């Protein structure tokens, strides 16, 4: 699904789709299957993608018929879907993505035009013409997600429209209009809220499912199997099937998610549905396939291995019979329910129950109770915090700030700008960066993304603040965004049920004692309660090891199998040989001598590099393997 909007000179652009508007120097081009046009006395509205009115009593046409420039910004939050809106009034254009920014809008201002596009390759001028965004590169190479935050790209000349942001363009000038974010306060939920959660979840599935068939990307965990159970509950087994990937990254380790596949097969047999399996096989180097895939990933700043796995899933899904099916996936549920701490991996222990509770301890350290302790200074005696600090060894922690607002900014920084995700963990531990690089990155990102949220955050609305920021960080990163982007290449209709506004509102207001703190409720409490009480679900099947070989062998490393033993190792090495990252990483901000030493070690003997060093190097490998748009 591609679009490009040119405001100004359009002579140098190459056509790729249908011109749906071309008047007064404004040209809109699209190859979207779903394009809706609405005319009013104020102007023309073009909607690309699937959109619905949150108010079920009214059609979306009612909102659009009354729209003008002033109302577009407020109307976006009344809509549900993954879409882009363009409103044209004479020679002015107003553009916005959906409420959560699921669909990217890149924009570039040039001498003769301003261009909005769905991917970097559709911009008329080289994205690298003004150099490279060092803060965005730091984030990409040091934080999980392997992608710049929402407003940024790797390039100084290109930006992305932010969550809740609209752009107005006229006379080759652009103005950004931000919707004020108001964090909802947490509420005291009673048992009746479990019914509300179930209603929201099932209603969304009812409205987005296809009558022709529904396919669930399965992982065997709680999230994807809850979607599977919900769809079967609503439509029966004949309208639902599953698809799972078999991870074969090296010949020596074989399938490294056999636990997950066995569990998925068991669940499929329970429901009597068909389960398809596609191989994520990195033991066979298919040059033509991977060359094409890297081009796709580069267009969208996707620098994680999930670009490969999500592309393989999409290819297989496109080959299956079933016509216009809807594809569902359980992405973002971990972050929405428990701030990402729900993988049974915080503290490895023989007891599955303790591993789950350790996840809850990790999320507790970012909850309202611990924020209060940070502000009062009592956090130093908190036994959970002391336990986690002791387990880190000799790492550096920042001194606590002086004022409540500065402390809140520190906590947001720890969650969204520090890969260790432990309060007050210092970026001084990050040896990929110089002292100047650490300072530059922290100041730029705090100012651009976190400072305004910190001003309005308190112990009552921490979760709403976090979920809002997740849309700017992890949920638009390479590990999540690639799922729908890769599906778009095969004209597949996808849906992430945990990213609908109803569930997001519910979880923004969900209190700490609903599985997010030191209470005895499980992680993902309302989801698991629904599966236990409201829907036919084989609850006991989730006992035991979670998914991967490392769940039972903690010395096992996915990164080692991919980057040291797969068929792609030689390609990874070749992408690094000439140290091309010197072209884009500033020596002021990056410790290039240290990076060079890691690269030399990897090229000389990849099987001998330590897991710790490999973990540091993987983002550099992927940056060079996928590549970037170079300066001419």
Image: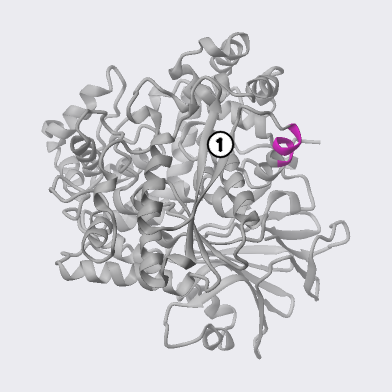
Q: Quadrant of residue 619?
A: top right
Which quadrant: the N terminus?
Answer: bottom right
Q: Residue at x 65, y 63 (%)?
A: 174
In this rendering, the answer to whether 549 lies above or below 611 is below
| Magenta stretch: includes residue 420 | no
Q: Which residue is drawn at 57% across and 71% down?
A: 50
How was the colour assigned to the protein in this rendering? one colour
Could you tell me if residue 453 is visible in this image? no
> Would residue 19 appear left or right of 282 to someone viewing this image?
right
In this rendering, the answer to whether 153 lies above or below 83 is above
Number of marks drawn: 1
Q: Which residue is drawn at 70% across and 74% down?
A: 92
Q: Relative to the observer, which residue lies in front, 6 or 103? A: 103
Which quadrant: the C terminus?
Answer: top right
Q: Relative to the observer, which residue lies in front, 615 or 166? A: 615
Q: Quadrant of residue 628?
A: top right
Q: x and y percent of residue 223 in the render?
A: 37, 53
**Residue corresponding to mark 1:** 305
Query: How crowded is the residue under tag 1: few (<14 C-alpha within 10 Å), some, or many (20+)?
Result: some
Could you tell me if residue 54 is visible in this image? yes
Q: Which residue is drawn at 33% across and 66% down?
A: 505
Q: x and y percent of residue 370 in the render?
A: 18, 43
Q: x and y percent of residue 82 in the render?
A: 54, 65
> Would residue 251 appear left or right of 219 to someone viewing this image?
right
In this rendering, the answer to whether 287 lies above or below 232 is above
Q: x and y percent of residue 409 in the render?
A: 33, 44
- Mark 1: which secondary structure? loop
Give the magenta-colored segment's residue range: 287-292
């Amino acid at each position: 699904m591609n679009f490009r909007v040119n405001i100004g000179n359009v002579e140098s652009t190459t056509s790729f789709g249908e011109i749906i508007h071309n008047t007064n120097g404004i040209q809109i081009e699209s190859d979207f299957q779903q394009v809706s046009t609405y005319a009013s006395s104020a102007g023309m509205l073009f909607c690309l993608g699937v959109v619905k009115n949150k108010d079920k009593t009214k059609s979306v046409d009612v909102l659009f018929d009354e729209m003008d420039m002033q109302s577009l910004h407020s109307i976006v939050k009344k809509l549900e879907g993954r879409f882009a809106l363009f409103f044209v009034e004479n020679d002015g254009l107003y553009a916005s993505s959906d409420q959560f920014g699921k669909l990217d809008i890149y924009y570039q201002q040039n001498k003769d035009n301003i261009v909005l596009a769905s991917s970097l390759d559709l911009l008329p001028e080289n994205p690298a013409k003004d150099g490279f965004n060092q803060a965005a590169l730091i984030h990409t190479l040091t934080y999980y997600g392997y992608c710049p935050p929402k407003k940024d790209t790797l390039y100084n000349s290109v930006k992305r429209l932010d969550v809740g942001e609209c752009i107005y363009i006229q006379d080759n000038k652009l103005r950004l209009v931000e919707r004020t974010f108001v964090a909802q306060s947490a509420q005291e939920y009673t048992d009746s809220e479990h019914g509300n959660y179930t209603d929201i979840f099932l209603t969304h599935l009812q409205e987005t499912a296809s009558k022709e068939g529904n396919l669930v990307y399965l992982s065997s965990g709680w999230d994807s199997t809850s979607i599977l159970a919900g769809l079967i509950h609503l439509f029966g087994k004949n309208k639902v099937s599953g698809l799972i990937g078999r991870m074969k990254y090296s010949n020596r380790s074989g399938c490294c998610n056999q636990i997950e596949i066995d569990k998925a097969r068991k669940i499929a047999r329970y429901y009597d549905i068909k389960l398809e399996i596609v191989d994520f096989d990195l033991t066979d180097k298919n040059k033509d396939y991977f060359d094409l895939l890297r081009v796709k990933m580069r267009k969208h700043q996707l620098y994680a291995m999930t670009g490969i796995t999500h592309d393989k899933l999409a290819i297989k899904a496109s080959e299956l019979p079933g016509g216009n099916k809807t594809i569902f996936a359980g992405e973002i549920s971990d972050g929405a329910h428990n701030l990402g701490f729900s993988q049974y991996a915080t503290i490895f222990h023989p007891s599955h129950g303790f591993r789950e509770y350790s996840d809850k301890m990790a999320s507790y350290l970012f909850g309202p109770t611990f924020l209060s302790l940070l502000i009062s200074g009592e956090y130093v005696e908190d036994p959970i915090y002391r336990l986690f600090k002791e387990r880190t060894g000799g790492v550096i922690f920042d001194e606590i700030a002086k004022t409540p607002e500065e402390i809140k900014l520190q906590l947001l920084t720890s969650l969204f700008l520090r890969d260790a995700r432990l309060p007050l963990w210092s970026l001084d531990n990050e040896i990929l960066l110089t002292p100047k690089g650490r300072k530059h990155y922290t100041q730029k990102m705090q100012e651009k993304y976190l400072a305004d949220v910190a001003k309005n955050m308190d112990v009552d609305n921490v979760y709403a603040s976090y979920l809002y920021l997740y849309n700017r960080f992890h949920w638009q990163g390479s590990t999540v965004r690639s799922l729908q982007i890769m599906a778009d290449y095969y004209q597949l209709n996808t849906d992430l049920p945990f990213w609908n506004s109803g569930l997001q509102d519910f979880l923004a207001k969900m209190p700490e004692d609903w599985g997010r703190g030191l209470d005895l409720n499980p992680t993902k409490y309302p989801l698991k309660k629904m599966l236990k009480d409201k829907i036919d679900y084989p609850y006991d099947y989730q006992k035991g090891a979670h998914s991967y070989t490392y769940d039972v062998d903690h010395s096992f490393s996915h990164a080692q199998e991919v980057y040291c033993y797969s068929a792609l190792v030689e390609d990874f090495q070749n992408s690094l040989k000439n140290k091309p990252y010197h072209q884009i990483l500033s020596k002021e901000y990056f410790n290039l001598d240290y990076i060079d030493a890691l690269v030399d070690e990897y090229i000389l003997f990849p099987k001998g590099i330590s897991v710790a060093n490999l973990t540091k190097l993987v983002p550099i490998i992927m940056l060079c393997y996928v590549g970037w748009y170079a300066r001419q």
